Amino acid sequence: MSKDYYDLLGVSKSASSDEIKTAFRKKAHEHHPDKGGDEAKFKEINEAYQVLGNAEKRKQYDQFGSAAFNGGGSGYSGGGYGGQGFGGFSGMNINMDDLGDMFGGFGDIFGFGGGSSRGSSRQPLRGEDLEFSLPLEFLEAAFGLEKEISFDKDVVCAECSGSGAEPGAKIETCSECGGSGSVIRMQRTILGNIQSRVTCSRCGGEGKIFSKKCSRCGGAGIYNDKVKLKVRIPAGIDDGESIRLSGQGAAGRKGSPAGDLYLRVKVKPNKRFIRDGYDIRTERTISVKQAILGDKIDIENIHGSFKLKIPEGTQSGTIFKVKEKGITRLRGAGLGDHYVKVRVLIPKNLDRRSRKALEEMDI
């Protein structure tokens, strides 16, 4: 007799793949044998989902009915798990992604998703990465310097050298896990009884037991303390850029590597200079006489002052470029340039003599 898979899952024939998946999860939870459900009904629900949850099989079912599958996908000849599901358990083919964590942490049991199921309790506990703001003056960023900074972070305990044991304490192999740091746990799932490896609760995954924990760090092997660090600030670094110091972050636990330290640069504005990449921009006011007749004027620069020639007939708003008077290029050779914008000051309230002189000029 042909089976109505849509009816088994409680969905319409126009249901989307997401609606079918949601219905399967609900029905599987309702009829799961370990939760007091009907095992035969649970197998039928699984059979229906194996067909309707597959676009190609669903198309065949809609055309020929359940007879097209000669029992409808309840068996799986493959011996592993992957994109098609997990086979070999009581003739059922369950897709682990479809079930998700409905009946427990399958990723922890089989070793996919969150990490390895074997030996994961002994993985290094790397220290935390740290990030701090590093305020710099304009010229400090332009020329670079060595700067001492202080901050709080987790450091290796000096009392126990990071072991977590009080100096002189007796150290024994954990009797619970035999020194492996993990134990085997039996978990009951829809696939039967599954063995999984978990962190030993007695030793916390260390594999060792101390007769007395370190009084300074409480057995953690690390504690929080204020540290001082000399940092070399490269010339040319700009506002918003970061300096990465490998291994200068928080200490790792029990010999694990430390994290990294990131210093995000915050450059204070300067009243005299404006930075534009590696270039410097300034403004200078000149008189009408200087603009008309030309002149040589002193320009203040981060490297010291220099002379700038103002040609005859210079217009207000003219920008002069002076090469290699800017900031050191952080990742390249040479310096940026210095751009000077001149503004012509138009005098007010001229006296009679000045006014007459201007009137007599044919300009």
Image (tube, rainbow, N blue to C red):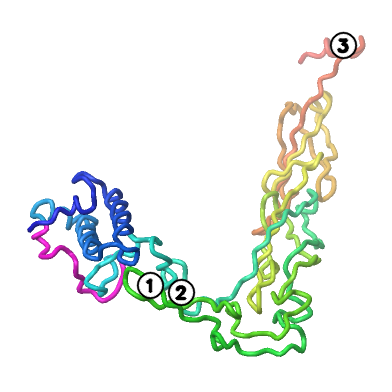
How far, Cα to Cα, is label 1 from label 3? 104 Å
For the stretch drawn in magenta, what is the main secondary structure? loop
Q: Residue at x 79, y 80 (%)?
A: 159
Q: Is residue 79 left or right of residue 238?
A: left
Q: Dot 3: few (<14), some (14–19), or many (≥20) neighbours within 10 Å?
A: few
Q: What stretch is highlighted in magenta?
A: 66-83
Q: In the rendered image of this protein, does residue 85 appear above or below residue 353? A: below
Q: Which of the numbered marks, if any, corresponds to residue 116?
A: 2
Quadrant that contains the C terminus:
top right
Q: In this view, does 59 lie to the left or right of 167?
A: left
According to the picture, the residue beneath numbered tag 3 turns out to be: 355
Q: In this view, does 361 lie to the left or right of 80?
A: right
Residue 185 position by quadrant: bottom left
Callout 2 amino acid: Ser
Front label number (1 vs 3): 1
According to the picture, the residue beneath numbered tag 1 turns out to be: 188
Callout 3 amino acid: Arg
